[in-house]
Each structure stands twice: as structure tokens, then as C-alpha cells.
Image (cartoon, helix red, strand yellow):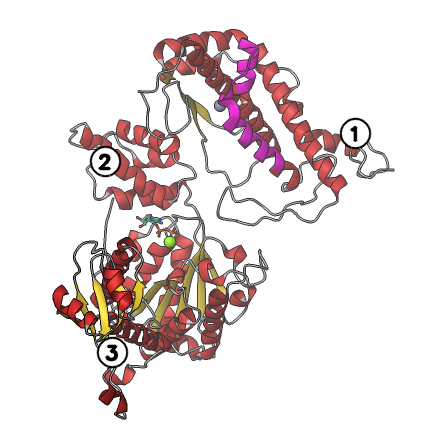
């Protein structure tokens, strides 16, 4: 894997004295300091005079003592102020002295009473001792904390003392080492961004005709596809100053800090125009203000966002500042951010296709030693769905595996193992399964494999293993799709449902007793069935009605919010999901019954060898037969069309086994 670290950020502007603005926060620190100093000074006890016990007794007996404070080991006392002193205009405060009494002097209290001394006893020593320590420690502790805080800030450089300053790293002209050559497989995005670099290099060419240079460009796409990398490449190519900051760095505990950081960032940027300002993970800041929880309003984020909007409007279109931002959740962004004149250009950085993956692998393979048997195009074919970051990771994993085996170069076998690792986690040979468990896992996996082999568009089954892997998988079936897919057909979805449920079906067929091992399959199948009905409009009864709003285009696995629907519709949806799952399960069972002898043989073999792959697997899989009626179940759309052409009136008529509305 290639690692290029950006050269150390250049400190933007050395603090000029005129720049110093005493902010509220600085005043706050000062106040805390003062309080602590006062506290320390007042807690500092004035050292009282230490007097011998005998002298103390003499003073008591001669009637000079006014009050005593008796604690376990000490007596503190004050003398009566003399008559002539009281006559003075300023009576001095009575001076305290201390003395150490004999342990438990029995006569003491009598003597004191006889001489009219005011007696106070202090509570037992424990509390007092603790209080004393605390009084001493507290200021020390505070000092230590403050010192720590300041020392840290000082290390970051004097600018960091000003909380409201922007934390943007600044890459001076040409200081980023990443170039467009390091980014592969996202050619369209690269082209668009190159154009933007062109704007900055030669703005006259565009402004001459009255065109306005775009102000904001938003990079959107799934995680790990190279958005941040692209931005850094621009920094390297554009030959203008490049300010880079992550949106979360604006937000602090104190309301108002973020806004002032935004202001500061733009002040600096405008001074250094032409330049590029890059805000990474923009969704951290730009979440729609009305969205989600109305109770959890976030003043700081809102203020910061407002400041950003204001700043974006505040500079002229041709001022030479281009704002670049990246996010994988464009849906949640505040609409105000996306309107014309702000982030009005969107550049999609999508997962790479096969050619793209090959190009990315090439970029990252430059730094590792490849064996002769490695063909990157084959690797690219085996890794559909992998993003750039996954591919970089794959090469690194393979290199690590090769190094562990003391190889001279990274071989295809290392890559294959690395792919398996990335898909299913590490092997866990130490997990010992009982005999019954092993048999259950074997039949379960073969069940997946048999059904997966027959399903349309799901690719070859490459390997079956009952060596435990990862966190939960006790066995797995590796089935890699042959091509990149951008659409999934209905028959493929139904086939996938059957494949997912094939493990459970095999367990039921062979053992007549099912296990918990299928929970993950069931989860996935249910999710898929739900999406079929509520998102893809594949329900006969509901027709093409969307019930969920797609929320996260680029992130999988985020829950989708449902549209407001009637309880009745909700019931119908549930029934449709269940119906689909039930049917898929039934079909899976049928198919396994039809192929039971292959199932038995494969499972036996798997139990012996623990993994099945290569030619052995291929010949076994060749024996599998489809069951009757499978095609028509997989592809109900075909039937629908036939029903339509048979219908003389040409009305669209959906079958309605359930009534949509209570009559
Ligand atoms: P994103 O910001 O889109 O989540 P990154 O830009 O942080 O992804 O990518 C993470 C790493 O993955 C990069 O540093 C790089 O090593 C690798 N990578 C991702 N996409 C590509 C690509 N298109 N070409 C080359 N390397 C890539
Ligand atoms: Mg990123
Ligand atoms: Zn399974």
C-alpha cells in the first residue's frame, strides 16, 4: 500500500499583535486564575504562636484567656483584649495562639470553667485532618489541571490559545504530494475536478465571457471511494493554497466557537485567494435543521451552519475562493447548502467498476512485490463492490500474509486468502464444535451452495468451508458474483432470498430439527423481502408504491423511515413480506428435496475435508437439477404481463388475495 503523508502543514499567519482579540473565553480563563489565587491565599493559615502548656495554664489562671478551641491534640486560644486597647479607635483582632495539652488532662475543663473561659470543642480529628489536606490539595489540583490545559495548548502553537480560530490545516502551494495519478478508477470525478483546477489557474478564460466560476463543489459517494484523497490531489495539483478542515472540527462545547472558526477560516482564505477551502464530512455540520429530532436542537451546529451559509454568500463569485466539501450522506444536508450559488455542483465519486478496480489495484500494487502469477485484472474481477479503500486494504493484507510466510513476492494465493479474510473475517481454528454441530453446519452450508448454484445472476460458488471464521460464522459459502451489477432483477432478488434460506431449509430437511445458526441469514432475507415490497414496488398486491423513503444512498444498512401509512396498509405489508419469505423457503425446500442425494454426498465430503473448492466442488455442483415450476416463481413479472395481454379490456388488474380496504 502506498503511504504518502502530506508535508507538515504550514502555520497560516504568525500571530501579529494586532490580531489579538481578547475573547470572552480568554477572560474566563483569567477569572478562574484569579479565583484560584484568592482561594489559595485565604486558605493559607496564619501561623499562630506556639505556647508551652504551662504558660497557657498560667494565662488561664491569671484570667487573661477569653476563648479556647479544643481539638484532640491541640488547643487554640485567644487572649482577652486589654482595657486600654479597647479604648483605642481601632481594636486589633485578638491574636490566636496554640498549645499542646497533656493528653486527656482531667483538670482542664474545671480550670477553664472556673476562669470564665468560653470553650468550643472541634469535631474529631478525622474530618479536620481531611479538611486540612483538601484545603491544601484543592488549589494544587486546580493548578495542575490548568497547567496541563495550557501546556497542551502551548504545544499546538500560540494560535491554538485562541479558541475561535479556525483549525484548518493549510497546505501551501504544492506541498501536498498526492497527485491525480494516485487516484484511479473515478475518471469522471477527476475530470470535473480538473476543470475546477482550471478555473483557478486561468480564471480569465471563463470570466471573459461572463461565466461565473462555481463557488462550491460537493463530492458525494460511499465511504472509502477516495473523496478525501481527491481533495488532497487537488491540493497537490492546483498550485494554490489549500485549506483543509473536517466539519466536526468546527463544533466545540461552547456555542459560538464554531461560527467564529468559520469566520476566521474564510477571512484567511479571502486573504490568500485564489485558493481552495476543503470541508470534509460536511454532514457533521450541514445536517438539515428541521430533520429528525425537534427536541434535540443543536444551537452550536445551527449557528455554525448559518455562519457558513452567510460566508458563502459573502464573497464574490469570482473572488477566487472555491469551496470543496465531501460527504457520504448528501440526503441529510440542509437544502440551503445545496441551492444554486452554494454547493451547486455535485461530483459523484462512486464505487469503481472492474476497470476502475484494476486501475486502483495498479496504483497500490506499485509499492509491493508481486509474483508472476498475479494478474490484477483477475483480482479486479473477483472483487465487485470493493471501494478504493477496500482494495488498498486487500493489497496490504496480501502483502502481510506473504511476509508471514517468508515469501519473496506476493502470490495469487495470498490475494485469494486476503479476499476471504476481508469478506468473512479471520479463521478461528481453536473453536471446537461437537459432532452434531459440525454436521448441522455442513448441511447448512451445502444447502446454501446448492441453491446458490441454480439461481440467476448470483455467480459461481467458489468455496464451501466449515472452518469457523470471524465473530459468528461457523461455516461459510463463498459465492462471488461474476460482474458488477447496477440493477438487480426481480428473479435475482427472489433467487437470493431462496439462497439465504437454503441453509435453514437443509437443516430442516436432514435433521428435522433447526438450529440458531440461520439467524443472520433470516435477518438478511427479511430485510431483502421488506425492501422488495416497500422500496422496489415488487408486490403484486401493493403494486409500485413506495412505502419507504430512501435515506442513505451511499451507506448500506441505515434504517429507512417509512412514509405515514394506515395501520391497514402496514398490516398488508407485513403479510406480503411474510408471504414472500414463506414462498421462498418452500421453494428452497423443494429444490433441496429434488437434490437430496447430492446434498448428502457434498455434506459428507465437506465433513471429511472441512473445505470444498476447485474441481471437486465443480463436478459435484454439476449434478444439481432445477425443480419444476421454479422459473415461474422466480419471475412473476412474466405472468403479470401475460395476464395483462389476456385481459381483453386491457385494464391493469392485480390479483388481490387480500382486500386492500376493509369493505
Ligand atoms: P473517502 O474519503 O471517500 O471515505 P478516502 O479518500 O479517505 O475515502 O480513501 C481512503 C484510502 O483508500 C485512500 O487513502 C487510498 O489509499 C484508498 N483509495 C480510495 N479510493 C481510491 C482511488 N480511487 N484510487 C486510489 N486509492 C484509493
Ligand atoms: Mg473521507
Ligand atoms: Zn447460512
- Label 2 residue SS: helix
Q: Mark 1 or mark 2: which comes first in sequence?
A: 2
Q: Name the residue beneath numbered marker 1.
A: 657
Assign the magenta stretch its main secondary structure. helix
Please give the residue where the numbered disc 3 appears in the rendered image. 80
- Residue 540: give x, y in percent of width and height: 72, 34
Q: Are marks 1 and 2 in contact (CB under 8 Å)?
A: no
Residue at screen point 39% across, 44% down: 387
Segment tinted magenta in the rendering = 504-530
Q: At numbered mark 1, what does the secondary structure look like: helix, strand or loop?
A: loop
SS for dot 3:
loop
Does residue 155 appear anywhere in the picture? yes
Front residue of 554/153: it is: 153
Vertical position of residue 255 compared to residue 467: above or below: below
- Mark 3 and ligand 2: say if the CB distance to the nearest ligand atom is below 8 Å: no
Q: Which residue occupies the foreground of this view, 480 or 6?
A: 6
Q: Which mark is residue 399?
A: 2
Tag in front: 1 or 3: 3
**Comparing marks 2 and 3, which lies closer to the viewer?**
3
Residue 406 position, x and y percent, is 15, 29
The answer to whether residue 142 is visible is no
At label 2, counting other C-alpha atoms closer than 10 Å, the crowd grade (few under 14, some 14-19, many 20 or more) is many
Give above or below for 171 relative to 181.
Answer: below
**Which class describes the residues within 10 Å of circle 3: few (<14), some (14-19), or many (20+)?**
some
Inspect the magenta stretch and tell me whether residue 508 lies in it.
yes
Dot 2 and dot 3 residues touching (CB under 8 Å): no
* 2 or 3: tag closer to the N-terminus: 3
Amino acid at each position: 500500500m502506498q503511504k504518502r503523508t502530506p508535508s507538515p502543514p504550514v502555520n497560516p499567519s504568525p500571530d501579529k499583535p494586532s490580531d489579538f482579540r481578547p475573547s470572552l473565553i480568554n477572560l474566563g480563563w483569567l477569572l478562574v486564575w484569579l479565583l484560584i489565587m484568592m482561594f489559595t491565599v485565604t486558605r493559607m493559615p496564619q501561623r499562630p504562636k506556639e505556647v508551652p502548656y504551662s504558660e497557657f495554664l498560667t494565662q488561664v489562671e491569671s484570667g487573661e484567656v477569653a476563648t479556647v478551641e479544643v481539638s484532640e491534640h491541640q488547643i487554640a486560644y485567644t487572649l482577652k483584649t486589654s482595657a486600654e486597647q479597647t479604648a483605642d479607635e481601632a481594636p486589633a483582632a485578638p491574636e490566636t495562639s496554640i498549645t499542646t495539652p497533656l493528653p486527656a488532662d482531667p483538670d482542664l475543663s474545671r480550670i477553664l470553667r472556673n476562669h470564665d473561659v468560653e470553650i468550643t470543642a472541634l469535631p474529631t480529628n478525622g474530618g479536620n485532618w481531611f479538611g486540612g489536606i483538601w484545603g491544601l490539595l484543592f488549589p494544587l489540583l486546580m493548578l495542575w489541571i490548568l497547567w496541563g490545559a495550557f501546556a497542551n495548548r502551548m504545544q499546538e502553537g500560540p494560535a491554538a490559545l485562541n479558541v475561535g480560530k479556525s483549525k484548518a490545516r493549510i497546505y501551501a502551494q504544492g506541498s501536498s504530494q498526492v497527485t491525480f495519478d494516485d487516484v484511479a478508477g473515478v475518471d469522471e470525478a477527476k475530470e470535473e475536478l480538473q476543470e475546477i483546477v482550471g478555473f483557478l489557474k486561468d480564471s480569465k478564460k471563463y470570466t471573459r465571457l461572463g461565466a461565473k466560476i462555481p463557488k462550491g463543489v460537493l463530492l458525494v459517494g460511499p465511504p472509502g471511494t477516495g473523496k478525501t484523497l481527491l481533495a488532497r490531489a487537488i491540493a497537490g495539483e492546483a498550485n494554490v493554497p489549500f485549506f483543509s478542515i473536517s466539519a466536526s472540527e468546527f463544533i466545540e462545547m461552547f456555542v459560538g466557537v464554531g461560527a467564529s472558526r468559520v469566520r476566521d477560516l474564510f477571512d484567511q482564505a479571502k486573504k490568500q485567494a485564489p485558493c481552495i477551502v476543503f470541508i470534509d464530512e460536511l454532514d457533521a455540520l450541514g445536517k438539515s435543521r428541521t430533520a429528525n429530532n425537534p427536541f434535540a436542537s443543536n444551537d452550536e451546529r445551527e449557528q455554525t451552519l448559518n455562519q457558513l451559509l452567510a460566508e458563502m454568500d459573502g464573497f464574490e463569485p469570482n473572488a477566487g475562493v472555491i469551496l470543496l466539501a465531501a460527504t457520504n450522506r448528501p440526503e441529510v444536508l440542509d437544502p440551503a447548502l445545496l441551492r444554486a450559488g452554494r454547493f451547486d455542483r455535485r461530483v459523484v465519486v462512486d464505487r469503481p467498476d472492474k476497470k476502475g478496480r484494476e486501475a486502483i489495484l495498479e496504483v497500490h500494487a506499485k509499492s509491493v512485490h508481486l509474483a508472476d502469477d498475479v494478474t490484477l485484472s483477475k483480482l479486479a474481477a473477483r472483487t465487485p463492490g470493493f471501494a478504493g479503500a477496500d482494495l488498498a486494504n486487500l493489497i496490504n493484507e496480501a502483502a502481510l500474509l506473504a511476509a508471514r510466510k517468508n515469501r519473496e513476492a506476493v502470490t495469487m494465493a495470498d490475494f485469494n486468502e486476503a479476499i476471504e479474510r476481508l469478506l468473512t473475517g479471520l479463521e478461528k481454528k481453536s473453536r471446537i464444535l461437537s459432532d452434531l454441530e459440525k454436521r448441522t453446519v455442513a448441511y447448512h452450508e451445502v444447502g446454501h451452495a446448492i441453491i446458490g448454484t441454480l439461481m440467476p445472476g448470483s455467480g459461481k460458488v467458489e468455496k464451501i468451508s466449515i472452518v469457523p471464521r470471524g465473530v459468528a460464522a461457523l461455516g461459510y459459502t463463498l459465492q462471488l458474483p461474476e460482474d458488477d451489477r447496477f440493477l438487480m432483477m426481480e428473479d435475482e432478488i427472489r433467487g437470493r432470498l431462496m439462497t439465504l434460506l437454503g441453509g435453514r431449509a437443509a437443516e430442516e430437511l436432514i435433521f428435522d430439527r433447526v438450529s440458531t445458526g440461520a439467524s443472520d441469514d433470516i435477518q438478511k432475507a427479511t430485510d431483502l423481502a421488506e425492501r422488495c415490497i416497500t422500496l422496489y414496488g415488487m408486490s403484486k398486491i401493493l403494486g409500485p408504491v413506495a412505502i419507504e423513503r430512501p435515506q442513505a444512498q451511499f451507506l448500506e444498512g441505515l434504517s429507512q423511515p417509512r412514509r405515514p401509512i394506515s395501520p391497514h396498509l402496514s398490516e398488508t405489508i407485513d403479510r406480503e413480506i411474510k408471504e414472500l419469505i414463506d414462498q421462498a423457503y418452500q421453494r428452497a425446500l423443494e429444490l433441496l428435496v429434488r437434490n437430496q442425494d447430492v446434498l448428502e454426498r457434498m455434506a459428507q465430503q465437506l465433513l471429511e475435508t472441512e473445505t470444498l473448492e476447485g474441481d471437486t466442488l465443480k463436478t459435484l455442483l454439476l449434478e444439481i437439477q432445477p425443480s419444476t415450476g421454479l422459473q415461474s416463481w422466480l419471475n412473476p413479472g412474466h405472468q403479470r404481463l401475460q395476464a395483462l395481454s389476456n385481459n381483453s379490456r386491457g385494464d391493469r388488474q392485480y390479483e388481490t388475495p387480500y382486500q386492500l380496504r376493509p369493505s
